[in-house]
Image: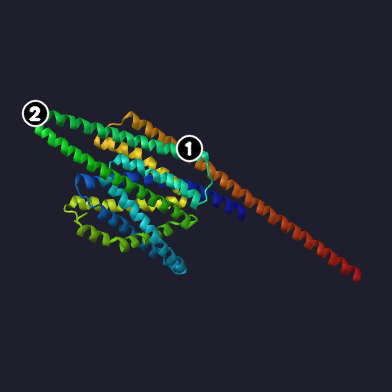
Amino acid sequence: MKKNEETIIENFKKKLTKSLKYIIATSVVILFVGGSELGAIIQGEYAYKQTYWLTYCSSGFVSLLSFSIFFNFSYFKTTFKQQKRLFLQASLFSVFWFLANYLYSLALTKTSVASVISLEQLATVLVFVFSFIFLKEQFSWPKTISVLICIVGVVLIACSDANSSSSNSSSSNSSSSNSSSDSSLTSNLSSLLNLKNLQEQSLNGAIGDILVVISTIATALYMVLFKRLIQCELTLLQVSIFLGYVGIWNLLLFWPGIIILDITQIESFALPTTSIVWTLFFVSLIVNLLFNFLLNWGIAVTSPLFMRIILAFSIPISTIVNYFLEQTNLTTLWTIGAAFVFIGFISFSIIDHFNQQSIQLQLDLQNNFSNLNIDQLTINNNEKGNENNNENNNENNNEN
């Protein structure tokens, strides 16, 4: 009876974990799209372009999760040495965290969104490679093909955005050249200014691309090393505590950057001036807090690569949201790219599901085999014990 009850409980936990996996994935997509839209509104429509300050506040706000330890303070007292080691390890993860978020946001101010999205998919490749190196995952051709299909789809979406933006800019340039054709001097000056702007754009584009590459390396290292650090599925409380430690380190390590950037006039410090921006600012902090928490919990429950595929899947979802909000056009190239991402995500989920089932089947077989061996040893020991008892009884009878 006890074995049957344990089997029922284990099966229930497995079903709950599978359901939890897709609940987390759906929530991560929604929060990622919502956070991106909020960031675009704050820095775009309301021109509050405090990239470093926004990143610092968003990263530091996560420290509030450390207070979750007071909900179970006895757990902290029983694992004090472990918590101390975890707090020190969080310092390295805070560096990866801050670099990944700040450099990505800074790259958006230097180069096009299409370029950033395309290069950011390098993180998916790096997570794929680092998983083999640090997590010792087995190579799988079906899984590799699924990842490549997703990456190709994202690149096609980025190219679609680039083509639409270039067509808009070319049309605006042609209209301005027609209006300025009356004066040759004005056209020469405008051509020189355009040449200078193109040089600045190319330089900023190169800098932005470099920033994205560094950001993707930091992202991939964070996700894979976090999975290796935990080495097992963390509970809700443990994920909260660890992220709280990362947030505390962000507050301690990166506050000098605000002063340095303000003194050098690279980014002059300024607080929001309107109540609307303040409201959007706090809402974005809460959204980013929930996103980062669920992303890390998703890594703990599933794998870094699965969560990266989820983030790639959120890109076409974000474009669809923009379509309804801003009435943007969805091109044929975008449709093909979105189909690639969708097919890659579905195929990866199916392959991952069957891989997990095969791994679980192997573990069940090993457990059953070990249980059979234990039962066989028990039977043998009982038989030997019975034989010894019979021999002793026979000897006692002979003596009598």
Q: Which quadrant: the C terminus?
A: bottom right
How far is mark 2 from mark 1, CA to CA?
A: 57 Å
Residue 140 visible (yes or no): yes
Left or right of 160 on screen, residue 9: right
Left or right of 348 on screen, residue 68: left
**Residue 251 appears at what percent x and percent y?**
31, 62
Instruction: Answer few, some or many: residues within 10 Å of disc 2's Cα (few below 14, many 20 plus, some between 14 and 19).
Output: few
Q: Quadrant of residue 76?
A: bottom left
Kind of element beneath mark 1: helix
Q: 308 and 376: which one is in front?
A: 308
**Residue 49 appears at what percent x and percent y?**
22, 50
The kind of residue on which mark 1 rests is Ile
Image point (14%, 28%), residue name: 178
In the picture as drawn, the residue positioned furthest to the bottom comes out as 400
Instruction: Answer few, some or many: residues within 10 Å of disc 1's Cα (few below 14, many 20 plus, some between 14 and 19).
Output: some
Q: Quadrant of residue 194?
A: top left
Q: 103 and 60: which one is in front?
A: 103
Q: Nearer the viewer's eye, disc 2 or disc 1?
A: 2
Image point (8%, 28%), residue name: 182
Kind of element beneath mark 2: loop
For marks 2 and 1, the one nearer the N-term is 1
Image point (46%, 51%), residue name: 301
Query: What colour scheme has been applied to the protein in the rendered image?
Result: rainbow
Q: Which mark is residue 132?
A: none
In the picture of the structure, the residue carrying the numbered disc 1 is: 145
In the picture of the structure, the residue carrying the numbered disc 2 is: 182
Q: Which quadrant: the N terminus?
A: bottom right
The number of discs equals 2
Residue 16 visible (yes or no): no
The kind of residue on which mark 2 rests is Asp
**Residue 3 appears at what percent x and percent y?**
61, 54
Q: Does the residue at mark 2 contact the one at mark 1 (Cβ under 8 Å)?
A: no
